[in-house]
Amino acid sequence: MPPPRHSCVRNCTAAGSPHPPVVASRVFMSKTEQVDFLVMGAGVAGLRAAVELARHGDVLVITKESLGESNTHYAQGGIAVAMEGDQDVALHLEDTVNAGDGLVYRPAAQALVAEGPVRVAELIEWGAAFDRQGDSPTGELLRTREGAHSLPRILHANGDATGAEISRSLAAFARVHKRIRFAEWTMVTGLVVSGGRVAAADLASAGPQVHKRNPWRVATRAVLIAAGGAGQVYSDTTNPAVATGDGIALATQAGAELADMEFYQFHPTALSLPGVPRFLLSEALRGEGAYLRNDRGERFMERYHPLLELAPRDVVARAIAREGLSESGLARPVYLDLRHLTGIDLHHRFPGISAFLAHHSLDLARDLIPVRPAAHYLMGGIRTDLAGHTSLGGLYAAGEAACTGVHGANRLASNSLLEGLVFGARAAQSMLADGLPLSSADDPLAPHQPLTAAEKKHAESLIVQLQASMWAHAGLLREESTLRQGLAAQQATAEALEELAQQGKFSRRLAEAQALSRVAHSILASALARTESRGAHFRNDFPKRDDAHFQKHSTFTRDQKVRFVEW
Ligand SMILES: Cc1cc2nc3c(=O)[nH]c(=O)nc-3n(C[C@H](O)[C@H](O)[C@H](O)COP(=O)(O)OP(=O)(O)OC[C@H]3O[C@@H](n4cnc5c(N)ncnc54)[C@H](O)[C@@H]3O)c2cc1C
């Protein structure tokens, strides 16, 4: 097998990115490129998988922006892990199953909680510094409690910057590995199916600088999609700009099955200030004792759930949505209140959140903090088995882009970083074990036609309209009529985008718009088909859970059909 080669954007510094670019390790010179394993995404799942794959092959990790710009980087609260033995693991399993509202695939949850401690211990060995007693490297690991966890079992780093620490430590570990190379500011734009399996991926520049050969194709034994979620499909989201569901859209386009796409978790407490991004106010704030209050000062969760502020996320999010509307439909503020917490230095415990709030003249310890729900985490995704296999040969998925059924209808807080570690490693192990051959890939890609300024503006406005429509029609509270309106709006968007694509036009934003539109379709169609309420999916017209008909997972396929199946 020829040595793998790849090109990489150098010295790209797109405005707004918080992360400096990694300089390319090598530059591809030849026409046809080949690599053993191609990993789409450099969050926790992609990086963990890359480390595993590099034990036996050469790995190319593609990331749409600079290394570290991912949902993983922004994770605040922590990583849930049961490190106290069998009883602790059993309780973590029960909490995960209970949060999932009757739809957790138990073997997946069992794998998550049982393998989690090993994966976290390994991560610590590789350099992840979680917070410890007395700020000492040998002190006991500090644990906090979050919603629907029966025990304090959430590890955190630098107070509220857990994801950044995990991302930093994994990237540092992967970066020195000779068999792992990164292509930053590069996007996967297509999967090439040949002989009934994915045999290559098409790539394109995604940053301000354009690769010498753009677009280009890389042949590979196997592709792992670890491209994260799709929060950008909604106008209100805690997710960064890269979270446009590209991996999910490409997989379904190539013929892989999706599952449980109607289950989008809305985080109850994103900052609600006009003109300010929906910055996440971690569940750990409520874990430390924060109250929720309406504009009459009432601690309203008493009316909604016995666990009060630590009730499952969907319950808290819907309660906030209800309290946030007057009878005449006007918006009313809802607040997080930490003013009563005296035994804790909130600024030390939550330095990142405190700094962000201070920038907007709010003090965590003294002010009521206005909050509202925002799209946060996709429980559905590309359907996989417990070893990361999708329904399409040569294509694997892990992390938020995948759906193993581990979260059921609602994710337990802080289970997703753990999911990335456990299932990233598992998917990589099957990519190695399956031993698929490397096929040659010709490079027949036509050059891209750039969009005109007017077309760019048009594509941008289509994205904004789609996001607003999804929030209005497929958000926290759904019903048949709104979902149908959402489908009609999505259809119009898809047609307008198709017109541009038919002319051979390409830009990163156009590709993202197409991905968002495909993901929106799968969410709307699945939400319409599930005529019950369960977990994160709430139908005003079917407010009850209906186990007789719907204790099943939905699947969505390229023929745009939704089916319900038992796993
Ligand atoms: C604000 C916030 C706070 C959170 N807090 C927590 C928490 O406390 N605990 C917890 O467990 N979970 C938390 N989560 C959820 C958790 O962070 C994510 O579910 C998890 O990190 C997803 O990891 P991943 O590896 O699957 O994907 P990501 O980390 O999202 O990585 C996706 C990668 O794919 C790349 N990519 C996307 N499209 C393309 C493309 N077309 N081509 C190439 N690359 C592409 C991106 O550039 C990125 O590198 C939080 C999420 C957010 C947004």
Image (tube, rainbow, N blue to C red):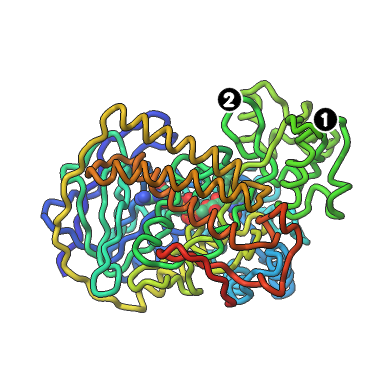
Tell me which residue sits at (77%, 26%) in the image.
Answer: 367
Ligand 1 within 8 Å, label 1 CB: no
Give left or right: position of 155 versus 397.
right
Lower position in the chain sequence, tag 2 or tag 1: 2
Whether label 2 touches label 1, CB < 8 Å: no
Q: Quadrant of residue 512?
A: top left
- Which residue occupies the extreme left position in the image? 30
Report the amino acid beneath label 1: Asp
> Could you tell me how far apart the alpha carbons at marks 2 and 1 are, in whole angstroms?
21 Å
Residue 322 appearing in the image: yes
Which percent across, then down, holds residue 88? 72, 69
Q: What kind of residue is marked 2?
A: Gly
Q: Which one is nearer the viewer's eye here, 524 or 79?
A: 524
Instruction: Say which residue appears at 40% left-offset and 67% top-offset.
Output: 256
Quarter containing the C terminus: bottom right
Q: How many marks?
A: 2
Q: Which residue in the structure is indicated by mark 1? A: 295
**Seen in the image, is 490 located left or right of residue 535?**
left
Q: Residue 316 at what x, y percent from top left?
A: 75, 48
- Label 1 Cα neighbours within 10 Å, binned few <14 / some 14-19 / many ≥20: few
- SS for callout 2: loop
Residue 75 seen anywhere in this rendered image of the structure: no
Give the image quarter of residue 306.
bottom right
Q: Which mark is residue 398?
A: none
Snapshot quadrant of residue 504: top left
Q: Would you name the residue on which mark 2 appears?
A: 275
Q: 92 or 236, which is in the foreground?
A: 236
Residue at 76% x, 36% y is 324
- Label 1 residue SS: loop
The structure residue drawn at horizontal position 40% and vertical position 75%, both measured from the top left corner, is 430
